[in-house]
Amino acid sequence: MQTQKYGELRSYVGTIATKLGLMPAVRALRLGYHDWVGSRRDPEERWRGGLDEEVEYWRRYLETKGFRWPDEFDSRVNPNGQMLSELVAQYLPSDRERVRILDVGSGPVSSLGFPRLPDGRVIELTAADALADRYEELLHTYRITPPAWPLPVAVEELSEHFGEGVFDLVHARNALDHTVDAFAGIRQMVRVVRPGCYVILQHYPNVAEFHAYTGLHGWNLDERKGRFVIWQRGSREIDLEKDIGSAAEVSAWRDSQWVYCAIKRKVLDP
């Protein structure tokens, strides 16, 4: 109940600030606080401090059946399935009759929904999220059956749980900015995908900066001249192609809304 009240209060304050035209000032204050205090906090401490707010967001999403995005909610929970997006489908291996996909940072209901392929091949979807135990409670409360019940696995610990080279594709949408260590998380995603297969990332650009590092927003992900960059205030920028070394081939691009990254695993030990 305390988490719910905090989330409602923050939403109310944000709404009032927006109506009064004060959001730029509020954001500047939050960034100043981050520069003064937040950037010196232990990364895991910062992450744990945002957990309740994240759970409250998803509680509202499930309770309202999508909040501001009811059509997207319906596509996620429709048991008849939805065609796998072209973005993801084009990177699937063609030689597998049964395709294994891991959705990382899936939340309570994976954005991939109950995925299907035009050629009829079977998709085995696995969902992983560090907050899975708390999401399971929400799913039971609102009597929602997800495409895959999320497993309580943090992105930084994927290979410890799943092993090496297990999945035909690993996917993360709007999730890596919420992690303790985004680069370590990407390295783990590369570890659990099969050699020759892909990790696909889809994120809003520079979300932590936009949200002034509040909640779980700890990392910025960006595309710069075809390169995928990870950064946050107070630490060095990571150029994924350079820093991941010989482990993978990296390509990045963007549209008007999203930043995308396709990572092809090349060797067994990234």
Image (cartoon, rainbow, N blue to C red):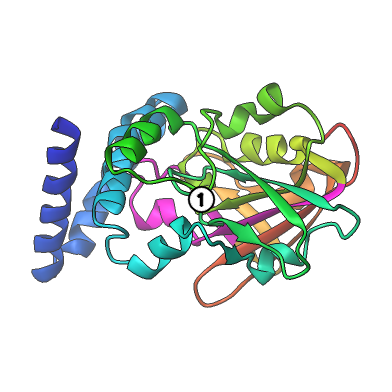
- Residue 81 spot, x, y in % from top left: 56, 61
- Residue 79 spot, x, y in % from top left: 50, 57
Amino acid tagged 1: Ser
- Residue 240 spot, x, y in % from top left: 71, 49
The residue located at (8%, 69%) in the rendering is: 20
Q: What stretch is highlighted in magenta?
A: 196-222
The residue located at (38%, 41%) in the rendering is: 216
Indicate left or right for 53 with 74 as reference.
Answer: left
Give whichever of 83, 157 is nearer the camera.
Answer: 83
Indicate left or right for 264 with 19 as reference.
Answer: right
- Residue 34 spot, x, y in % from top left: 32, 40
* Residue topped by disc 1: 110
Indicate left or right for 111 with 117 as reference.
Answer: left
Residue found farthest to the front? 80
The residue located at (45%, 29%) in the rendering is: 43
Mark 1 is surrounded, within 10 Å at the Cα level, by few (under 14), some (14 to 19) or many (20 or more) other residues, namely many
Indicate left or right for 148 with 28 as reference.
Answer: right
Q: Please, is residue 62 above or below residue 163 in the view?
A: below
Q: Please, is residue 228 above or below residue 266 in the view?
A: below
Residue found farthest to the bottom? 256
Q: Looking at the rendering, in which quadrant would you find the C terminus?
A: top right
The residue located at (39%, 24%) in the rendering is: 45
Give whichever of 260, 87 is nearer the camera.
Answer: 87
Q: Looking at the rendering, in which quadrant would you find the N terminus?
A: top left
Check if residue 200 falls in the magenta segment. Answer: yes
Q: Please, is residue 165 above or below residue 262 in the view?
A: above
Q: How many marks?
A: 1
Q: Is residue 181 visible?
A: yes
Q: Is residue 50 visible?
A: no
Q: Please, is residue 241 above or below residue 88 in the view?
A: above
